[in-house]
Image (tube, rainbow, N blue to C red):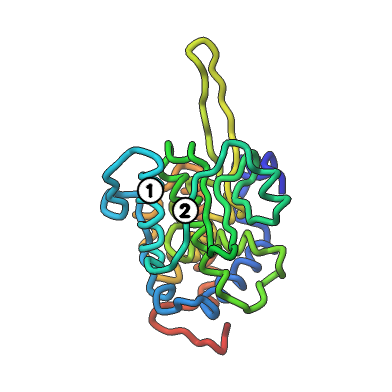
Protein backbone atom coordinates (compact mmCIF):
# COMPACT_ATOMS: atom_id res chain seq x y z
CA UNK A 1 0.00 0.00 0.00
CA UNK A 2 1.41 3.42 -0.98
CA UNK A 3 2.18 6.00 1.65
CA UNK A 4 -0.40 8.45 0.31
CA UNK A 5 -3.14 5.84 0.77
CA UNK A 6 -1.89 5.03 4.25
CA UNK A 7 -1.94 8.69 5.26
CA UNK A 8 -5.35 9.22 3.73
CA UNK A 9 -6.65 6.39 5.88
CA UNK A 10 -6.52 8.58 8.96
CA UNK A 11 -9.00 11.03 7.51
CA UNK A 12 -11.57 8.71 5.92
CA UNK A 13 -14.54 7.40 7.85
CA UNK A 14 -13.93 4.57 10.26
CA UNK A 15 -10.81 3.75 12.23
CA UNK A 16 -10.49 -0.02 11.78
CA UNK A 17 -8.34 -1.95 9.32
CA UNK A 18 -10.28 -3.86 6.67
CA UNK A 19 -11.62 -7.33 7.44
CA UNK A 20 -8.78 -9.22 5.74
CA UNK A 21 -6.17 -7.25 7.69
CA UNK A 22 -7.98 -7.82 10.98
CA UNK A 23 -8.21 -11.57 10.37
CA UNK A 24 -4.55 -11.78 9.43
CA UNK A 25 -3.51 -9.89 12.57
CA UNK A 26 -5.61 -12.15 14.80
CA UNK A 27 -4.09 -15.23 13.21
CA UNK A 28 -0.57 -13.79 13.35
CA UNK A 29 -1.02 -12.73 16.97
CA UNK A 30 -1.92 -16.26 17.95
CA UNK A 31 0.99 -17.56 15.84
CA UNK A 32 3.41 -15.33 17.76
CA UNK A 33 2.12 -16.62 21.08
CA UNK A 34 2.51 -20.22 19.90
CA UNK A 35 5.94 -19.89 18.24
CA UNK A 36 7.84 -17.15 20.07
CA UNK A 37 11.32 -18.28 21.22
CA UNK A 38 10.76 -16.61 24.60
CA UNK A 39 7.16 -17.58 25.41
CA UNK A 40 7.45 -16.90 29.14
CA UNK A 41 8.45 -13.33 28.35
CA UNK A 42 5.93 -12.73 25.59
CA UNK A 43 3.02 -14.05 27.64
CA UNK A 44 3.79 -11.61 30.46
CA UNK A 45 5.43 -8.80 28.48
CA UNK A 46 4.86 -5.41 30.10
CA UNK A 47 3.72 -2.45 28.07
CA UNK A 48 6.70 -0.15 27.53
CA UNK A 49 5.90 3.49 28.21
CA UNK A 50 7.39 6.68 26.76
CA UNK A 51 8.86 7.65 30.12
CA UNK A 52 12.18 8.30 31.82
CA UNK A 53 11.51 5.23 33.95
CA UNK A 54 11.51 2.92 30.93
CA UNK A 55 14.20 4.87 29.05
CA UNK A 56 16.55 6.50 31.58
CA UNK A 57 18.96 7.97 29.03
CA UNK A 58 22.09 9.69 30.26
CA UNK A 59 23.35 11.27 27.03
CA UNK A 60 21.75 13.15 24.12
CA UNK A 61 24.66 12.40 21.82
CA UNK A 62 24.59 10.03 18.86
CA UNK A 63 25.88 7.32 18.53
CA UNK A 64 26.01 6.78 22.30
CA UNK A 65 22.31 7.68 22.56
CA UNK A 66 21.44 5.06 19.94
CA UNK A 67 23.52 2.43 21.73
CA UNK A 68 21.77 3.19 25.02
CA UNK A 69 18.32 2.98 23.42
CA UNK A 70 19.29 -0.25 21.63
CA UNK A 71 20.36 -1.85 24.91
CA UNK A 72 17.15 -0.77 26.63
CA UNK A 73 14.97 -2.03 23.78
CA UNK A 74 16.69 -5.41 23.92
CA UNK A 75 16.31 -5.47 27.70
CA UNK A 76 12.59 -4.67 27.59
CA UNK A 77 12.18 -7.40 24.97
CA UNK A 78 13.79 -9.97 27.26
CA UNK A 79 16.76 -10.18 24.90
CA UNK A 80 19.50 -8.35 26.80
CA UNK A 81 21.92 -11.24 26.32
CA UNK A 82 21.30 -11.70 22.58
CA UNK A 83 24.38 -10.88 20.52
CA UNK A 84 23.81 -8.29 17.80
CA UNK A 85 25.94 -5.42 16.53
CA UNK A 86 24.55 -1.90 16.02
CA UNK A 87 25.79 0.46 13.34
CA UNK A 88 24.78 3.89 12.02
CA UNK A 89 23.87 4.04 8.34
CA UNK A 90 25.43 6.27 5.71
CA UNK A 91 23.08 8.89 4.36
CA UNK A 92 21.70 7.26 1.22
CA UNK A 93 21.58 3.47 1.38
CA UNK A 94 18.10 2.34 0.35
CA UNK A 95 18.83 1.01 -3.12
CA UNK A 96 22.07 -0.73 -2.15
CA UNK A 97 20.48 -2.45 0.84
CA UNK A 98 17.40 -3.68 -0.98
CA UNK A 99 19.53 -4.93 -3.87
CA UNK A 100 21.58 -6.89 -1.32
CA UNK A 101 18.45 -8.54 0.08
CA UNK A 102 18.65 -6.79 3.46
CA UNK A 103 15.45 -6.25 5.45
CA UNK A 104 14.73 -2.52 5.21
CA UNK A 105 12.42 -0.77 7.67
CA UNK A 106 10.79 2.26 6.12
CA UNK A 107 7.68 3.00 4.10
CA UNK A 108 9.22 5.72 1.93
CA UNK A 109 12.55 7.40 1.51
CA UNK A 110 15.70 6.07 3.16
CA UNK A 111 15.34 3.12 5.54
CA UNK A 112 14.92 3.84 9.21
CA UNK A 113 16.64 0.59 10.09
CA UNK A 114 17.89 -2.69 8.65
CA UNK A 115 18.58 -6.21 9.86
CA UNK A 116 21.02 -8.65 8.31
CA UNK A 117 23.03 -11.71 9.26
CA UNK A 118 26.52 -12.48 8.01
CA UNK A 119 29.44 -14.67 9.04
CA UNK A 120 30.21 -12.02 11.65
CA UNK A 121 26.75 -12.40 13.20
CA UNK A 122 23.55 -10.33 13.20
CA UNK A 123 23.72 -6.61 12.47
CA UNK A 124 21.14 -3.87 12.95
CA UNK A 125 21.62 -0.46 11.37
CA UNK A 126 19.73 2.78 11.99
CA UNK A 127 19.35 6.18 10.36
CA UNK A 128 21.35 8.65 12.50
CA UNK A 129 18.83 11.48 12.04
CA UNK A 130 16.24 9.41 13.92
CA UNK A 131 18.23 10.06 17.09
CA UNK A 132 16.60 13.50 17.05
CA UNK A 133 13.21 11.88 17.74
CA UNK A 134 13.39 9.34 20.54
CA UNK A 135 9.98 7.79 19.80
CA UNK A 136 10.92 7.11 16.18
CA UNK A 137 14.29 5.68 17.16
CA UNK A 138 12.68 3.33 19.70
CA UNK A 139 10.04 2.20 17.18
CA UNK A 140 12.64 1.50 14.49
CA UNK A 141 14.96 -0.39 16.83
CA UNK A 142 12.04 -2.37 18.27
CA UNK A 143 11.15 -3.48 14.74
CA UNK A 144 14.71 -4.55 14.02
CA UNK A 145 14.98 -6.40 17.35
CA UNK A 146 11.78 -8.14 16.26
CA UNK A 147 13.68 -9.36 13.19
CA UNK A 148 16.44 -10.65 15.44
CA UNK A 149 13.86 -12.53 17.50
CA UNK A 150 11.93 -13.99 14.57
CA UNK A 151 15.14 -15.07 12.82
CA UNK A 152 15.29 -17.94 15.34
CA UNK A 153 11.78 -19.18 14.45
CA UNK A 154 11.58 -21.76 11.66
CA UNK A 155 7.80 -22.17 11.57
CA UNK A 156 6.09 -20.94 8.40
CA UNK A 157 4.85 -17.38 8.64
CA UNK A 158 1.12 -16.67 8.61
CA UNK A 159 0.38 -15.33 5.15
CA UNK A 160 3.66 -16.60 3.73
CA UNK A 161 7.19 -15.17 3.46
CA UNK A 162 5.92 -11.93 1.91
CA UNK A 163 4.32 -11.06 5.27
CA UNK A 164 7.64 -11.16 7.13
CA UNK A 165 7.84 -7.39 7.53
CA UNK A 166 4.26 -6.80 8.74
CA UNK A 167 4.74 -9.77 11.09
CA UNK A 168 7.87 -8.11 12.46
CA UNK A 169 5.94 -4.90 13.17
CA UNK A 170 3.36 -7.04 14.96
CA UNK A 171 6.12 -8.80 16.90
CA UNK A 172 7.49 -5.44 18.10
CA UNK A 173 4.03 -4.55 19.38
CA UNK A 174 3.65 -7.95 21.04
CA UNK A 175 6.99 -7.32 22.80
CA UNK A 176 5.44 -4.22 24.38
CA UNK A 177 6.39 -1.33 22.09
CA UNK A 178 2.91 -0.63 20.71
CA UNK A 179 2.63 2.97 21.92
CA UNK A 180 5.81 3.89 20.06
CA UNK A 181 4.80 2.14 16.85
CA UNK A 182 1.28 3.60 16.94
CA UNK A 183 2.56 7.14 17.40
CA UNK A 184 5.17 6.86 14.63
CA UNK A 185 3.20 5.28 11.80
CA UNK A 186 3.23 8.74 10.21
CA UNK A 187 6.32 10.90 10.76
CA UNK A 188 6.08 14.66 10.34
CA UNK A 189 9.22 16.70 9.73
CA UNK A 190 9.91 20.39 9.27
CA UNK A 191 13.05 21.75 7.70
CA UNK A 192 14.49 25.08 6.63
CA UNK A 193 17.39 27.47 6.80
CA UNK A 194 15.69 30.54 8.25
CA UNK A 195 14.56 31.92 4.89
CA UNK A 196 12.80 28.90 3.46
CA UNK A 197 10.88 26.33 5.43
CA UNK A 198 9.39 23.03 4.38
CA UNK A 199 7.15 20.32 5.79
CA UNK A 200 6.97 16.67 4.91
CA UNK A 201 5.21 13.47 5.92
CA UNK A 202 6.61 9.98 5.65
CA UNK A 203 5.65 6.56 6.90
CA UNK A 204 7.65 4.06 8.90
CA UNK A 205 7.33 0.33 9.18
CA UNK A 206 4.98 -1.97 7.30
CA UNK A 207 1.70 -2.12 9.20
CA UNK A 208 -0.56 0.81 8.42
CA UNK A 209 -1.49 3.36 11.06
CA UNK A 210 -4.86 1.69 11.68
CA UNK A 211 -3.25 -1.74 11.83
CA UNK A 212 -0.75 -0.58 14.44
CA UNK A 213 -3.54 0.82 16.59
CA UNK A 214 -5.47 -2.43 16.20
CA UNK A 215 -2.39 -4.43 17.20
CA UNK A 216 -1.91 -2.25 20.27
CA UNK A 217 -5.52 -3.02 21.19
CA UNK A 218 -4.76 -6.73 20.76
CA UNK A 219 -1.89 -6.30 23.22
CA UNK A 220 -3.90 -4.43 25.84
CA UNK A 221 -6.86 -6.80 25.58
CA UNK A 222 -4.66 -9.90 25.64
CA UNK A 223 -2.95 -8.65 28.80
CA UNK A 224 -6.17 -7.26 30.30
CA UNK A 225 -4.83 -3.71 30.58
CA UNK A 226 -6.90 -0.60 31.24
CA UNK A 227 -7.06 1.16 27.85
CA UNK A 228 -7.52 4.65 29.29
CA UNK A 229 -3.90 5.26 30.44
CA UNK A 230 -2.71 3.88 27.12
CA UNK A 231 -4.97 6.21 25.16
CA UNK A 232 -3.61 9.16 27.14
CA UNK A 233 -0.15 8.47 25.66
CA UNK A 234 -1.37 8.30 22.07
CA UNK A 235 -1.56 11.14 19.59
CA UNK A 236 -5.03 12.17 18.43
CA UNK A 237 -5.35 9.92 15.35
CA UNK A 238 -3.95 6.72 16.84
CA UNK A 239 -5.97 7.37 19.99
CA UNK A 240 -9.21 7.37 18.00
CA UNK A 241 -8.20 4.24 16.09
CA UNK A 242 -7.09 2.48 19.28
CA UNK A 243 -10.38 3.15 21.07
CA UNK A 244 -12.35 1.85 18.09
CA UNK A 245 -10.15 -1.25 17.96
CA UNK A 246 -10.63 -2.01 21.67
CA UNK A 247 -14.40 -1.81 21.28
CA UNK A 248 -14.35 -3.99 18.18
CA UNK A 249 -12.14 -6.65 19.76
CA UNK A 250 -14.27 -6.82 22.90
CA UNK A 251 -17.45 -7.25 20.88
CA UNK A 252 -16.20 -9.60 18.17
CA UNK A 253 -12.92 -11.31 19.02
CA UNK A 254 -12.41 -11.49 22.77
CA UNK A 255 -12.97 -15.25 22.81
CA UNK A 256 -10.10 -15.80 20.34
CA UNK A 257 -7.39 -14.06 22.33
CA UNK A 258 -4.83 -15.97 24.38
CA UNK A 259 -4.52 -14.52 27.87
CA UNK A 260 -1.94 -14.54 30.62
CA UNK A 261 -4.30 -16.44 32.89
CA UNK A 262 -5.35 -19.22 30.54
CA UNK A 263 -3.98 -20.24 27.16
CA UNK A 264 -5.54 -23.14 25.30
CA UNK A 265 -2.92 -24.04 22.72
CA UNK A 266 -5.44 -26.30 20.97
CA UNK A 267 -7.31 -23.15 20.00
CA UNK A 268 -4.29 -21.54 18.34
Q: Position of residue 56 (x, y in %)?
A: 27, 50
Q: Position of residue 197 (x, y in %)?
A: 54, 17
- Which residue, given by chain and number where applicable, does mark 1 sit on? 233
Residue at 65% in and 41% down: 108
Q: Nearer the viewer, mark 1 or mark 2?
A: 2
Quadrant of the image occupied by residue 252:
bottom right
Q: Neighbour class for label 2 at 10 Å: few (<14), some, many (≥20)?
A: some
Residue at 57% in and 62% down: 168
SS for callout 1: loop
SS for callout 2: strand
Q: Position of residue 186 (x, y in %)?
A: 55, 42
Residue at 65% in and 55% down: 102
Number of numbered discs on residues = 2
Q: Is residue 12 visible?
A: no
Q: Is residue 203 above or below residue 171?
A: above
Q: Which mark is residue 86?
A: 2
Amino acid sequence: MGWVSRLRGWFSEGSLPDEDSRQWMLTAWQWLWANDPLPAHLHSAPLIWPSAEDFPLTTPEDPERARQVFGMVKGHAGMAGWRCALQAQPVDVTAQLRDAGVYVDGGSGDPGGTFSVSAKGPLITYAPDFCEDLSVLIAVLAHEVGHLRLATVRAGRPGGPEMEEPLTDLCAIAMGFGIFLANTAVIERTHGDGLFKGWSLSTSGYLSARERAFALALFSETHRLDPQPIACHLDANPKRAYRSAVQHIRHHHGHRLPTMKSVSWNDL
